Amino acid sequence: MIYYLIRRLLVALPTMFITLSLIFFTLRVLPGDPALAILGDNATEEALNNLREQMGLNAPIWQQYLVFWGDILRGDFGLSIASGTPVINLIASNFSPTIILTLTSIFIGSLIGIPSGILSALRPNSFIDTVVRIVSITWVSIPAFLLGIILILIFSLKIDLLPSMGAGEGFLGTMYHLILPSFTLGLINSAVIMRIARASMLEEVNQDYIRTARAKGIPTGIVIFKHALRNSLIPVITVIGLDITALISGAVITETIFSRPGLGSLAVGAITTRDFPILQGCLILFAALVIIVNLIIDITYSIVNPKIRPS
């Protein structure tokens, strides 16, 4: 197991290096002058040049690249151009709302998607199976922004039951304000999990070893939950992992619709003001989270099915 973990870490490190390098060069070729964005159109060329020098933008690209990696290794993400606040502080203050939203959405999606997908697979072509498939197609067809608006119209404006914006204060306030946005993402997420769980379980229950287990008289519940469920969960884990990364980076829309603080809102604000240190810091964090989540998925594979480790 330790050898397996070390090998996965050695694969993750070059991936991180390539990804962060791509972020650096992509941001440097984007149109727009950060100095001009700060000082405005009426700034003199001398003032613009002084600010570019202060920000290190006049240095050759290879020097900027070395400074970039030096800062990353020291954990220094620079200062916000607009406010002068350390980027790491801004990211830290906006990190927890996005992570809480992501994890609750995954929890809701898994809670709905896995049992309904398995139930559907165990009763193929039944009424339950038909309902599950119709619901999953419906949820997956609705864009997140549209479902968010529908939920706001019903639960906030029509029956005035849930708040439509803000993050709330304290534990209960946070949970109360989290219901609508997390269900918006969770319902859509459940549709994908539901379909994968159904397809995976259908494939497993038709395998020869399942037929053999049933022929030996082993109770159906044990055959399903002890044998078929373990193997059928592997594709589901993959989907959940991919959903986590997609939800973290795709929190922009949901946080905007519900006026919530978070990394998505922070990144959008940075794009608007061309505050590229903040944008760069958010992209680095998103990339790091994607790689870490994929590493956790690989480790989870090996726990669910140890036969995977040698491969």
Image: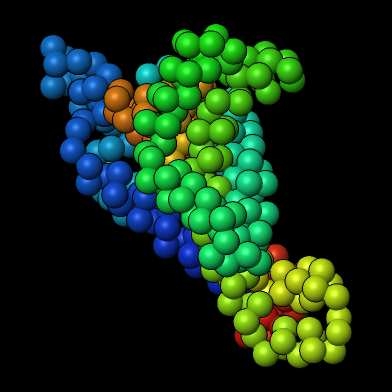
In this view, 276 is above or below 64:
above
Is 234 on the left-hand or right-hand side of 187? right
Question: Which quadrant holds the C terminus?
Answer: bottom right
Q: Residue at x 42, y 62 (%)?
A: 18
Q: Residue at x 20, y 27 (%)?
A: 49
Count of numbered marks: 0
103 or 287: nearer the eye? 103
Q: Residue at x 46, y 50 (%)?
A: 134
Is 150 on the left-hand or right-hand side of 163? left
Question: Which quadrant holds the N terminus?
Answer: bottom right
Q: Residue at x 27, y 19 (%)?
A: 38
Question: Residue 273: x, y in percent?
Answer: 30, 23
Is 206 on the left-hand or right-hand side of 215? left
214 or 171: nearer the eye? 214
Quadrant in the rendering for residue 269: top left
Question: Residue 199: x, y in percent?
Answer: 54, 68
